[in-house]
Image (cartoon, coloured by chain):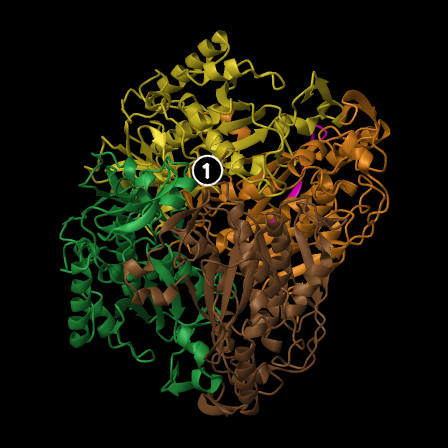
Chain colours: A yellow, B orange, C green, D brown
Amino acid sequence: MSTWGKNLKISIFGESHGPAIGVVIDNLPHGYKIDINEVVLQMGRRAPGKDITSTPRFEADTPVIQSGLLNNITTGAPLCALIYNKNTRSTDYNNLVRTPRPSHADYPAYLRYGGFNDIAGSGHFSGRLTAPLVFAGAICRQILSTKNIVIGAHAYEIAGIKDTPFDMADITYEKLDELSHRTAPIINPDAEKLMRESIEKARMDCDSVGGIVECAAVNMPAGIGSPMFDGVENRIASIIFGIPAVRGIEFGAGFAASKMRASEHNDPYYYDSDNIRTRTNNHGGAIGGITSGMPILFRVAFKPTASIAKQQDTIDLISKNNTKLIIKGRHDPCIVLRAIPVVESACAIALLDLLMDCNGKI
Amino acid sequence: MSTWGKNLKISIFGESHGPAIGVVIDNLPHGYKIDINEVVLQMGRRAPGKDITSTPRFEADTPVIQSGLLNNITTGAPLCALIYNKNTRSTDYNNLVRTPRPSHADYPAYLRYGGFNDIAGSGHFSGRLTAPLVFAGAICRQILSTKNIVIGAHAYEIAGIKDTPFDMADITYEKLDELSHRTAPIINPDAEKLMRESIEKARMDCDSVGGIVECAAVNMPAGIGSPMFDGVENRIASIIFGIPAVRGIEFGAGFAASKMRASEHNDPYYYDSDNIRTRTNNHGGAIGGITSGMPILFRVAFKPTASIAKQQDTIDLISKNNTKLIIKGRHDPCIVLRAIPVVESACAIALLDLLMDCNGKI
Amino acid sequence: MSTWGKNLKISIFGESHGPAIGVVIDNLPHGYKIDINEVVLQMGRRAPGKDITSTPRFEADTPVIQSGLLNNITTGAPLCALIYNKNTRSTDYNNLVRTPRPSHADYPAYLRYGGFNDIAGSGHFSGRLTAPLVFAGAICRQILSTKNIVIGAHAYEIAGIKDTPFDMADITYEKLDELSHRTAPIINPDAEKLMRESIEKARMDCDSVGGIVECAAVNMPAGIGSPMFDGVENRIASIIFGIPAVRGIEFGAGFAASKMRASEHNDPYYYDSDNIRTRTNNHGGAIGGITSGMPILFRVAFKPTASIAKQQDTIDLISKNNTKLIIKGRHDPCIVLRAIPVVESACAIALLDLLMDCNGKI
Amino acid sequence: MSTWGKNLKISIFGESHGPAIGVVIDNLPHGYKIDINEVVLQMGRRAPGKDITSTPRFEADTPVIQSGLLNNITTGAPLCALIYNKNTRSTDYNNLVRTPRPSHADYPAYLRYGGFNDIAGSGHFSGRLTAPLVFAGAICRQILSTKNIVIGAHAYEIAGIKDTPFDMADITYEKLDELSHRTAPIINPDAEKLMRESIEKARMDCDSVGGIVECAAVNMPAGIGSPMFDGVENRIASIIFGIPAVRGIEFGAGFAASKMRASEHNDPYYYDSDNIRTRTNNHGGAIGGITSGMPILFRVAFKPTASIAKQQDTIDLISKNNTKLIIKGRHDPCIVLRAIPVVESACAIALLDLLMDCNGKI
């Protein structure tokens, strides 16, 4: 389903070439002032055409709010926003079903929906559906910011080229705030240059590249979350895998933890004046599903954009033969930069939902 | 919470040194014959003392079934099983709260539960709570096996030493079936020898090592799952992060996909006689949240066991000073081998829950 | 929350005087042809101004579909429909908060939302929010009708005047189909006449009357539902209490069952040719939460419309004194007739959700 | 399913003649001292053999706690309690399936579970499964009592004989506390005498009678709950219909509201010193799903016990003929008195779950 959440519920709808896409956010905390310009700014970070690495296609992605705000303050009633589509259905896409695109949802979706799903522009499976997710995240992060909680991410790696990683135990509010307002949040300008060259080279080769997004949040209070299936990691992971092209997620030291010894990996506690902190943050801000007060930190792996102009092998579902496919249209040679605000947004929604747990207090 | 599931609900309870731990499985499909010996065998794979890499402590972990089975056939009513604890509370563990163990849930749980949580043997946060998870998984995999679905895993990596990885596009029922009955499922005997040496060396150093579990399932039908937040990856990830010490999960090519180009990563479809397959399986069996019919494949990163005999830095919550801690008792120098049946079990529960989606069919 | 459902999720949004109200229906079965005229017809039954007993105000309530339909066939992706409001915010309603209307949600909502809720036209608490519920129900009943399941209701009682009740054990498809297309579904014309007189009298007295809706569904298969908390009655009741002004629900013989002996109340089984039926249907089509194959039958009590022109006692929340209130505007002297399609719609949503249970079958 | 709850989850398991029945309560607030004697006392009110109107059979129903309590204080971890069955499976009950008992779940359950459900003593459908519900309720009401919230109920009506009803707007803590400790909570001794005579007469006639339970709770704070589908009424109704034999529920004036005019039904607000109250309480403590601060009040209709010794008509599912049935064993001629603590318990669970909503506050 396209519904997520325990305390708040987001319900995302829409198909790429239908009239509109959008989201309903149910049970949002009331009384929070929303800066719509900031929301539009966040949506703009995801929109195509803002960075040369993405498609030259330009979509304004203006949210049209239908409910839940009064004088720009959350009412507590479900907040619904629509984003009207510019590209609406005009042509016959039936050929796409016949020859499913490799590593796209075409074929699995065809089976799942008996061929009734809308395939124009990938329908409900389009990356465009991350626009309402960013909208919802932009609302949630403004609420979180009243608690001084800020979320930021950067291109940890693109096409195998690494950016300067976060210093996991020492991430500042200012750094995350700055990154969360950039269209291309890459810390190291030299890495950025190499990344852009790799992306450009892939484009020239009618190919695409993937990468890793590193996301952090600071000032999340300690003691939030629950053990087993309802913890920080479970809930962040379950929403993050809702972003197209995600292939993995790791917290703190992540997969590298598997190569470490405990004496190296364990994070010793210490008193920093009266504050309890850990010297390192290999745990990524949550242990046993519960926040420690250290920065929440996770990385998300993105595969290379599946749509490439290069000829590919596939099948013809009607003639039942193997065949070749050339995908037409313009496609992002790398979606990692546009994915950064999406990851931040999913994180914001998850953290707000976690904060809304009563945590056994009545 | 310790409750998981959409169509079936598992509810795990118990504290390490309380009278018993156990699980309720609600809405289990009815009419399935359960081989209790096979369940006990699976639980034995997780139990300590079976392999020299784990603690010499021996726990029988016999499930005592209270409901839901009649003549060993599922009735469809909630199935409850208890596992009685041998080590029940006897000593005062209050010191443990005072000086929280690094990278254990002690301190976050102390905040979350206001100090009222049972800390004896880590209480509800104990790795022992994976025993009822294995029980539930063992029930689910027997139901899945009637559809020819089998799940198996191996120690993909321990202490940085790699086992022979799965050939992702060509995993056989027989291979998984064999692995899923071994106590130390490592494919390459040479790797196993090196892994055991590394574990032994860590033990001698009063330290511990981590590793990666690679898990696969074959014969899952194509077209199962849903886009966005309710897909194969979301649901597997959300249950897998319920296993203590998990730090990351990746599907198919996973984090390595981030270094690939699409021309290399995309999985071309082809007809294998009448069957539709992909040449490679970088997608790990699910695209857009929906199964493709190819093997489900994911890897799970485990951190090194946090409890080590080495002296560590920590804090004293009462005197509010930095202090030192030595953890007493016997601890696994590597929990990866024991974690393998736990990962398989969580996967089995998730796949059965997915199969129970109506998928829009009434 | 304004989200309901287990297998399908409906998420209703909007405030009475905001830009639009609407609904997202997630996980709807795919491949079902929707007759939009029939949907509009159902919505028209609920709209004001269709029957003299309701307000003379006329609202078209045209649904504008944003997603989930392609060539009028359900795609399986979330279906979103908007209904634009004609009366949008224009005046200052702050006085209404100061002197809460008796038996309206004004005061409880004020506390719940800290005064941030939109109170214009009752905001999200408006009876107008039943329009998207009827939309969703109209979609669901078209899907149910492909299984020959039909739902109909009538004004069982208004202002104490009883209509001819359903013969619970013998309700026909044709009867329900006919009722479900009428604006004023009352079986007995003499009762209708008396009801209308009572309503008119209440209107002249600046007062209002309540009533009871009796709703039935036939051809629901036997064996659907689950015991305890997930049964037919639990799920129908939980959605029905989402309709404003509902004060009670009873199934089959209902409250009258409490006065009967078992020898009178028990429904004996018999073979009607090869079909298993019960001679009477005091159980209302479900026993132990599971359908019996007999008609589903329940009654819903509606209180008199709380908004009346008569002067009423209330409080002034600012001066903290007792005071008097006269509610301005036109209000329905009886909402029972308009509530009938709402009850049918809620029933349709619940029955479709129930049908989508896998019921232990994989 | 047998799982209920949003913030806390109760999962009830067991079959009447299996080894044990019980319940897991997940996410219970931590740090609350539980008086086990009081829990046992509440369970005793439900147990058979305590009142002459019930079966002479005696069951101790001692809860054996497996987890979640430490020194009788809630730890916050799932609390599991078992109640061992004295009557375990010994004989062949297969004849019961062949000739389903009228108005029992035998036949619907047979279809739902394909005949695999345990039918001994009605299996999971047994009224005995209300014992763990009372256990869970007894825990919850002790937590609620720390907020001065108390819940009590009485036999509003049995066999058509009415007890003195609650004065809805003026119910005291003391009255509810007293009722909630009685085995036969009937307010009017004359009514009690007549009720007992009616029950005894029904027993002599090999028949049974039904009744209505009226339940109230005081000191529930105002402003708790949510509109539409997640309100006080929805959640109480959804758990109450989990009690066997319930046929209806009404809040406040309930079905009688349908015969009233608004001028009579509306509850005027007034200041009682600084407290805001309503003169009458026809709304039953919740408007629009949200508490008003007035007593929560609802009534629950129970059908007469379906199991009677009188010969009844039924079918033979094997010979496919109509036949006669005589049910053996001892059965309660009236379950209303034993149902009273069950209704109170379900109410307690629902109110605690409601209190645990964050209500938009972070």
In percent of the image, x 50 and y 46: which residue is there?
D221
Q: Nearer the viewer, residue B330 or B49?
A: B330
The answer to whether residue B332 is visible is: yes
Residue A11 to residue D57: above or below: above
Pointer 1 residue:
D360
The range drawn in magenta is B151-161
Residue A289 shown in magenta: no
Across and down, in percent, residue D67 comes to 71, 52
Q: Residue A282's x, y, as percent?
A: 65, 24
Position of residue D186 relative to residue A87, above or below, is below
Residue C25 image position (x, y, % from top left): 33, 48
Hey, what amino acid is under mark 1? Gly
B270 or C332: nearer the eye? Answer: C332
A29 is higher (above) or lower (below) than A189: below
**Which quarter of the image is occupied by the C terminus of chain A?**
top right
Q: Residue at x 24, y 74 (%)?
A: C163
In the image, taking residue B229 as reference, residue C36 lies left or right, namely left
Residue placed most toward the observer, A199 or D49: D49
Corner quadrant of residue B57: top right
Name the residue: 57% across, 85% down. Answer: D95
Q: Quadrant of residue D257?
A: bottom left
